[in-house]
Structure formats: C-alpha cells, structure tokens
Image: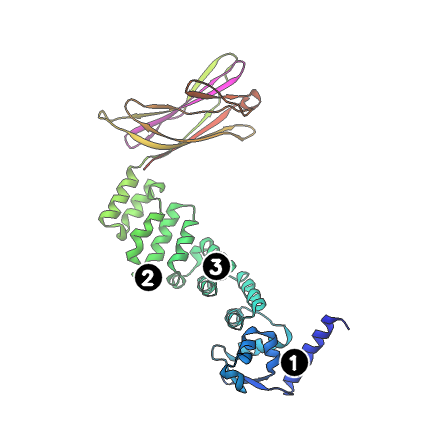
Amino acid sequence: METVSFLKAMSASFDEMRAANELVDMVLVFGEVRLACHKVVLASSSDYFRRMFSCGLRESQSDEVVMKEMDAETGRLLVQYLYTGKIDITEENAQNLLSASNMLLLTDLEIASEKFLCEHIQPSNCVSLLNLSHLYELKDLIKRSQHFVAEQWTKVSDESIIDLKEEDFIEILEAHDSHEGKFIRLQRWVKANEEREQRFMDLMQLVDLPGCSKNFIRDIARDEELLNNTRGMQLIQKALKRVKITLHHEAIRIPSSPFRSESRSSPVRCHNLRWQLVVIRTSGWEDKLDVTIVCQSTETTRWSCRVNYEVRVWSHSPRRALLTKRGRYVFGPNQISLRLPQSVYGRTQEYGHGNEPFIVYRRTQMHGPIIVEVNIEEAG
C-alpha cells in the first residue's frame, strides 16, 4: 500500500473512531458543545496541543480542555480539520478560522484562510480585514486590503472610515496620484472622527496644495474650516501664488536646407509673469534644435523666480520621445531667458561650443514636425 493511501486510511479510521466515541481520552469544550477526541491525534496535527499535552501543563493531566476563544461552529470545523485535513472555508467562517489557526499554530490553514480573504475583499469588510491583517501580521492581506480601500474609496462607508487607522490611511493617501483627491480623502478621514481634527494640519504635508488647480483651492480648500488658522492661511496663500505651468508647442514648420526656422508658443500668464517657448530649427548638413524659455515680469521692481523645469521633446509621427531634460534655474530682470542644456541624438557622443552644449538630431529622427513640452514649477 502506498504511503499516501495508508495515511488517508488511518486518518479516516481515527475520524470514525472519534464519531463512535471509541478509545477517546479527552474532551474539547466549545461553549455548550463538547467534542470527544484522541490526544495523540490532536498532538500530531497541532503543535499547540502537542506542547499542551507534553510540557506538564495543567491541561495535560485533565480529561477536559475548555477552548474559551472559539465558538462551537468553529470548534467543530477545526476538529474535523485536525482529523481529516479537510475544511470548507466560507465568507461566514474565514475570519474565525484565521484567528483559530493562528492560535493553534496551524500554518497551512492560516495561509489558506488569508488567501480566501484576499479573494473576497469587499467595501463592507475591507477596513475590518485590514485591521485584522495587522493583528496577525499578514503581509499579503495588508497589501491587498490597502489597495482595495484606495481604489474603492468612494464605496467604503463612513462607519468603516472611522475604523481606518492612521498608518493605513497614510499609505493609502500616498498611493493616490491626484493632490485634489488626496485633500478630499483627508477631509473625509478626519471628519469621520472628531478626535482626528487635531491631526489635519500635520497630515496636510502629504498634500501638495500648489499642485491643485486654482479653482479647487479657492472653492474647496479655502472653505475648509480646519484650514481657518494662521498655518492654514499661509498654505493657501503660498499655493495661490506659486508658479506651476506647462508650455506646449508644436514646431510644424520644417526649414528647407540650409535655412533656419523660428517659432514661438502662445504666451502663458501666471500671476505677474509671462512665459513663452522659443523653438529654433536649423537645417543643413545636420538638423539642429534649440529650445529657449523666456520669462518676463510686469513688475518694474526687482523680481526673481526660482523654478524646477522639465523639457520633453517628441517626434510628431510616429510619436516617439527624443529628449527629456530636468534642471533648476533662477529667472530675474537680468536673466529673462534660459536656453535649455541639450545632448546629441542618433549616437551617444555630445558636441558643444564652450559651456553651451546643443543637440544634434539625425535626419531620421528630426524628419517632420516635433512637439516640445516644458513643465515649470516654482522651487521651494
């Protein structure tokens, strides 16, 4: 007889003996339910019972063990599992089985229960499962539950939001892309429990308020009572004054060799500053591209604006990235333009004049219109 078949037959035989009350030597008590069992079977299936019966504990001398932490139905399922290795996990019993398997050191059952719960996360149980997963340090269930809450935020009830712990809320907030969405979520989490209101300003550091639209700041953020304080007003004022723009331009005209073509983007105004892109394309033995950012102020007094910039250039058709550059620059009365640092494309080598490198594009890359986009954000 094969080993597996022998073990199955022995398991079935023990279960039949338990049902017939044959040679049982102890009783597990689950509330009002008493289940007669064999110590040797319990000890061989669970390290919890093995230690209990072999380490001289009081229970090892008793014919009866009271399982106070488990209800009767969970007890029946566990005894069946300890004898047969079989169990039916359902939405109704999964959490109880997870708790019991953790207590009884039943690793395989704990893993199976966690997997089942990961596959049955819903708006009604996502927060409770998240809290439960922390209790038993279940990494997969923690990750899945946090992701579910983040993705299904609007479907999670206010009652569940009340139970959402701050450390989980921070993880969920940081995973969200939209800063306007972050602000709305922060409002809801704080207002679910009055005791959290004192945490609002500290958690606002996770929200890039200047990254929100001006209309959002004026219509939503400025009306938030929890921002109605000195620190909050400073955040709002700074956000409304901060420069954050995108300059987009399609250089459609293609110069006929060996000529030079210059085009400008539509100007963009932000506060007292006027921004514009100047794109110069030169045809000859090689096609060259020169991109310059121009910033002018309506103020007559001294002014300055420190910015972080990112320039991206694509070929128009097929759409393909040709260049991405990032840097920092300070605009002012004597520095109203910035010629962006550039590199050579087509091969890895770079060319340049002194301290001013430029990009040389092969005709295979520069044939046809190009798209230039520059993102500018005021630096702190």
Q: Which mark is residue 193?
A: 2
The nearer-to-camera label among 3 and 2 is 3
Q: Secondary structure at mark 3?
A: helix
Mark 3–mark 2 Cα distance, whole angstroms, equals 23 Å
Residue 364 sits in quarter:
top right
Q: Going from the N terminus, do you reach mark 3 or mark 2 first?
A: 3
Which residue is at a point 26% across and 52% down the rendered structure image?
225
Place of residue 155 in the rendered image (x, y in percent of width and height, measured from the top left)? 44, 58
The kind of residue tagged 3 is: Ile
Q: Earlier in the sequence, mark 1 or mark 3?
A: 1
| Residue range corresponding to the magenta coloring | 265-292
- Which sits earlier in the primary sequence, circle 2 or circle 1? 1
Amino acid bearing label 2: Asn
Q: List the residue tagged with mark 1.
A: 15
Asked if residue 282 is positioned above or below residue 147 in the image, the reply reads above
Quickly name the residue at label 3: 142
